[in-house]
Image (spheres, rainbow, N blue to C red):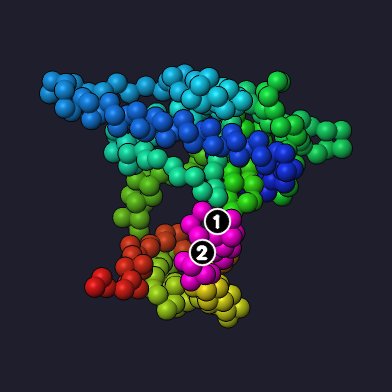
Amino acid sequence: MLTGIKLKANPTSNQKLILSQWMGCARLVWNAKVAEEKYYRTFARKYYPIGTYAPIDQKAAQFKSKELTPWLYQCPSQIIRNSAVNWYQTYQKFMKGLCGRPKTKPKADRGSVYLTREVFRFDHCKDGNVRLFIGTQTNNIGYLSFKAHSKFEIPNSLYVRKERGQYYVSFCYESGKDESHLSTNAEHLKFLQGSTKEYLEESVIGIDRGVAIPVHAGCQSFDYSKNQKNMMDKSDRYIKRLQRKMARQKLTSNRRKKTKHRIAKHHAKKANIRNDFAHKTSRSLVDSQAKVIVFEALKTSNMVRRPKV
């Protein structure tokens, strides 16, 4: 069974600088592939015969130039290749209708870099700890400190992400659990079709989502605690105050960047409260006797959105 994990990283100031540069190089290659595809697509539509399409590939060597992009030579070539491959795979998903067309990524206080096995390794120490080495033999940041809150297996690839100045290491790995005994959705629905009414009433629970009370499940209701509501209201007041402050600041000033970062931290606090509530509520529902959980496809954001004037 494939499972994932997200670990908190604690890089040094020099490691933060190098990781930010690598993230910038990966973002540049992604945006360059987006611009290249748009140019070829427009050219093919205007000048090529009908039915002729622009070539789609995962090459990135044309973006490296000693004059235009000398900083790309300071980044491991595997990271540049991985960024182009990620763009190509996303475009293939777009062609299959699984997602939207790849878009340019703005420079913001968040970013990520995709690392394959050539650019990292986990070393097991004698004391039982695991250390993460990132980079190649000639271009590396050394060992990256991280907090392993649970056991994990060695992955084939991983992401190093930056969110609001915090760094995380996330990856997926095979847990070794067997999935062969689990029934598919079709098999489960076929079993429910032959069940009695009493069994269905005991085993099926419907989830009613709302605005005032987030979740109603049968005779149970799940809502934010009083402390959580107070913290979210407090964050909303700070966000409004900081947004008014940021509107009066100069667009390219460092003080405006600090204010924007403070706003992002309050938004993150609200998101953490929502994630905590969702995790605890889902755990309570899974621990119940219900075998089937039905959710309402309700767009709560549309219910609380103000009408356009």
The answer to whether one can see residue 152 in this image is: no
Q: Residues within 10 Å of mark 2 (few under 14, many from 20)?
A: some
**Amino acid, disc 2:** Gln
Residue 223 lies, with reference to residue 72, above or below; the image says below
The image quadrant that residue 164 belongs to is bottom right
* Front residue (pair 268, 25): 25
Q: Position of residue 40 (x, y in %)?
A: 27, 26
**Amino acid, disc 1:** Ser
The dot on residue 253 is 1
Left or right: where does residue 104 sit relative to residue 227?
A: left
Asked if labels 1 and 2 touch by Cβ distance under 8 angstroms, the answer is: yes
Task: Please tell me which residue is depicted at 60% across the width and 27% down the height of the picture.
Answer: 75
Left or right: where does residue 163 sit relative to residue 41?
A: right
In the rendered image, which residue does mark 2 sit on? 249
At numbered mark 2, what does the secondary structure look like: helix, strand or loop? loop
Dominant secondary structure of the residues highlighted in magenta in the image: helix
The magenta-colored residue range is 242-267
**In the rendered structure, does residue 175 fall within the stretch colored magenta?**
no
* Front residue (pair 246, 54): 246
